[in-house]
Image (tube, helix red, strand yellow):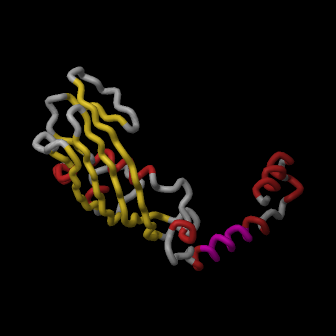
Amino acid sequence: MKYLKQYRIPFSGLSTGKHSFDFEIDEKFFECYEHSLVKKGDLKVVVDLQKQENMLIANFDIQGSIELTCDVCLSTFDSPVHIKERALVKFSEEDWNDDTEEVIMLSKSDYELDIAPLLYEYINVAVPPYTKCSEQGIGVSCDPEMLSRIENENNEDDSSGGDNENIDPRWEALKKIKNN
């Protein structure tokens, strides 16, 4: 977790106004999170921080590519990513652990903002629920060898139904749904 210390913004010494911070994210970042959907990536992050007397406004611009695994052919491919997010940081003297999606509460004694959890969340939420080489990749298509194997497997399943006489009618109805 020492690696993630570089993703902290010390705001206590900053003057009121706008400030810009640049960060890079690579596979070492994702290694710090055991259950990350993304394992490799090459991303550039620009954080525009607007400091006010009682709050901070952080605008995130994340660009680059992440490595995804195709749900169809299981090959890995680079998918371009462009994420824009905003977080509000408010200061409170009370102990408040009720952060929301956009509002983060810090105590008045805090002097730096740890953006690593925010970056992790923004990147993992940007991963599509269904990944396919031809849809998320640029100039990439599914592995033809794997597609032919899948097609052969499906054909074998269809032709191996030799004992149609003893099949439960409920299973037969489900097979009809599967083939639609």
Q: Is residue 158 magenta?
A: no
Question: Does 84 sit above or below residue 87?
Answer: below
Q: Is residue 48 left or right of residue 172?
A: left
Q: Residue at x 32, y 38 (%)?
A: 88
Residue that lies at the very extreme toward the left in this rendered image: 13
Q: Is residue 149 magenta?
A: yes
Q: Is residue 12 left or right of residue 28?
A: left
Question: Does 167 sit above or below residue 25?
Answer: above
Q: Residue at x 46, y 70 (%)?
A: 77
Q: Residue at x 14, y 44 (%)?
A: 15
Q: Is residue 180 left or right of residue 79?
A: right
Of residues 84 and 155, which is closer to you in this image? 84
Of residues 70 and 26, which is closer to you in this image? 26
Residue that lies at the very extreme toward the right in this rendered image: 165
Residue stretch in magenta: 147-156
Question: Does 117 sit above or below residue 79?
Answer: above
Q: Is residue 147 left or right of residue 39?
A: right
Q: Main secondary structure of the magenta part?
A: helix
